[in-house]
Amino acid sequence: MRRAAFAVAAGAMAVSLAACGSAKESGGDSSKSAGSEKKGDAIKVGLLLPENQTARYEKFDRPLIEKKVAELTGNRGKVVYANAKQDATLQSQQVETMITNKVDVLIVDAVDAAAIKNSVQKAKDAGIPVVAYDRLAQGPIDAYTSFDNVTVGKTQGEALLKALGAKAKSGKIVMMNGSSTDPNAKQFKDGAHSVLDGKVNIGKEYDTKEWKPENANSNMEGAISSIGKKNIVGVYSANDGMAGGIITALKAAGISVPVTGQDAELAGVQRIVSGEQYMSVYKPYGPEADAAAEMAVALAQGKSLDSIAKDKVDSPTTQSVPSVLVAVTSLTKENIQDTVVKDGVYTIPEICTAQYKAACDKIGLK
C-alpha cells in the first residue's frame, strides 16, 4: 500500500511546504529532542488518538502503528495507547500521563490542534519528541505525517462537479464541513471552495461540531427547511460519517442527490455501491501509519529523519517540520475493486452483504 508522498503548490495549502530550510532555522535540531539519548529497541511509544466516532482510528490507525513499531523494534518496542474521545481536556491529561510514565516519544493526533500546544511544549521540555499524526498540531512538534488535505477537498469538489454535470447551477448545494477545531477541516474546505466557487450556488454551509453524524443530520434538516427540498442539487460532505447523517435527512425528505465523503469507511463504501453516496476519498492508512511509526522510532532512538521525511511543512508555531504527505484517490463505484479491495482494506464479502449483494452484482463487484 506504500505510495509516494508528494508536495503541493504553496499557495494551495493552508500550511506551506518549504523547499529548503534547516531544523536549526526553526529553533533547534528537529531530528533529536533536547535531552534525548540514543536508545535501543526497548522503547515506549505513546500513541494518542482523538476520537472513536470515526471507524478508522480503532480499525486501522492503532493496529497499523502498533504493528509497524513492533516490526521496527524486533517486538521490543511497546505502544502505550489512549483515546481522547473528542475531549481536548482529556487529551491534555493523557499527555501528562504519558510524560509521567516516561514514554520515549509521542504520536499525537490532536482533538484541537491549537489547544494541544501547551501539552506539546511540556513533552518537549521533558525531552520527549512529538510526532503530529494526521492533524498538524501546534507547538514544537518534531515531525508530521498526513495526507495532502487541500487536495482531498479538491478531489471531493471535482467529483461533485462531475456528478452534477449540467445541473451544477440549476439549484443549490449544501456544504457540510468538518469541525472548526480541526485544521484539516479548514484545508478540506479551502480545497473544495477552490474548485466549487463560481461553478455552483452554495445555499447553506456549516462547520459541523465534532464531526458528529447527528450534528450533520440536524444541519441538513435545517438546510432542507431553509432552501427547500426541490432546490437542492448536491451536498458536499467532508467525511463519510457525516455523509451517513446527511443521507438519512435527505431520504426522510424524499431527496436523492450526489453526496461526497472521505475515509472510505465500510458504511460509506456500501452506500457508494447502493448509489446513496456518490464518492468518498480513499486515504491509504498504511503509508501514513508506517511513516508515523518510522519517525517515532527514529526520534526515540536519537536518529535523523532525513531518510524518512522528504517534505517540510510550516505550522502556525513551528517552521520546516520534517513531514511525510501521502497521496489520495477518489473512490467511486468504478474503482472499489482496484482500491480498497485490492489493498486489503475490505473483502468483497464484507462489502457485499445480503443487503448489498444485488447492487454489488450490478456493478460487477464479485
Image: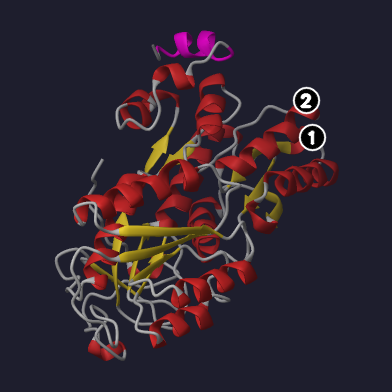
Residue 235 visible (yes or no): no
Q: Is residue 274 above or below residue 193?
A: above
Q: Position of residue 27 (x, y in %)?
A: 31, 91
Magenta span: predominant SS is: helix
Residue at 76 percent of width and 48 percent of height:
219
81 on left or right of 42:
right
Residue range corresponding to the magenta coloring: 355-364
Quadrant in which the C terminus is drawn: top left
Q: Position of residue 244 (x, y in %)?
A: 64, 36
Residue at 74 percent of width and 27 percent of height:
251
Examine the structure image and report whether residue 362 is included in the region drawn in magenta.
Answer: yes
Residue at 53 percent of width and 25 percent of height:
270
Question: Sequence order check: which comes first, mark 1 or mark 2?
Answer: 1
Circle 1 is placed at which residue position?
229
Q: Is residue 275 above or below residue 221?
A: above
Disc 1 + disc 2, Cβ < 8 Å: yes
Numbered disc 2: secondary structure: loop
Residue 34 visible (yes or no): yes
Of the pair 72 and 77, the residue shown nearer to us: 77
Quadrant for residue 306, please give it.
bottom left
Q: Position of residue 139 (x, y in %)?
A: 45, 81
Q: CA distance from mark 1 to mark 2?
A: 8 Å
- The amino acid sitting under disc 2 is Gly
Of the pair 68 and 291, the residue shown nearer to us: 68
Numbered disc 1: secondary structure: helix
